[in-house]
């Protein structure tokens, strides 16, 4: 149960980071956009790890 809750939470954070990165790129704040996309990728990896208990 804890794994699925953590997985859903990190997936939600991944979506938020992608949605925040889009306006950052539009305003030409590339550093912030890249940082948010890296955070989104990290959250995606954590989501996979939480649901399947394995990395890739």
Image (tube, rainbow, N blue to C red):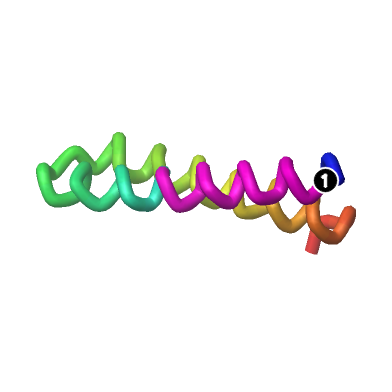
Asked if 53 appears above or below 33 in the picture, the reply is below
The region drawn magenta spans 3-16
Task: Measuring from the top left, give residue 25's x and y in whole percent.
Answer: 20, 49
Furthest toward the front, the residue is 1
Furthest toward the left, the residue is 27
Furthest toward the bottom, the residue is 56
Q: Is 16 on the left or on the right of 49, as rendered?
A: left
| Res 24 → quadrant | top left
Tag count: 1
The residue that mark 1 highlights is 3
Q: Is 15 on the left or on the right of 48, as rendered?
A: left
Asked if 30 appears above or below 41 in the picture, the reply is above
Task: Measuring from the top left, give residue 12's x and y in whole percent.
Answer: 53, 48
Task: Measuring from the top left, give residue 10's x and y in whole percent.
Answer: 61, 44
Secondary structure beneath dot 1 equals: helix
Q: Main secondary structure of the magenta part?
A: helix
Quadrant location of the C terminus?
A: bottom right
Which residue occupies 13% across, 50% down? 26
Task: Measuring from the top left, give residue 44's x and y in whole percent.
Answer: 61, 53
Which residue occupies 65% across, 50% down? 8
Which residue occupies 41% across, 45% down? 16
Q: Nearer the viewer, residue 1 or 20?
A: 1
Q: Is residue 41 located in the magenta-colored stretch of the structure?
A: no
Q: Is 45 on the left or on the right of 15, as rendered?
A: right
Q: Is 35 on the left or on the right of 2, as rendered?
A: left
How packed mark 1 is, by other alpha carbons closer than 10 Å (few <14, some 14-19, many 20 or more), is some
């Amino acid at each position: 149960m804890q794994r699925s809750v953590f997985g859903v939470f990190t997936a939600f954070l991944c979506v938020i980071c992608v949605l925040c990165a889009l306006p950052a790129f539009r305003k030409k704040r590339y550093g912030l956009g890249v940082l948010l996309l890296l955070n989104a990728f990290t959250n995606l990896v954590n989501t996979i790890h939480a649901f399947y208990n394995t990395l890739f």
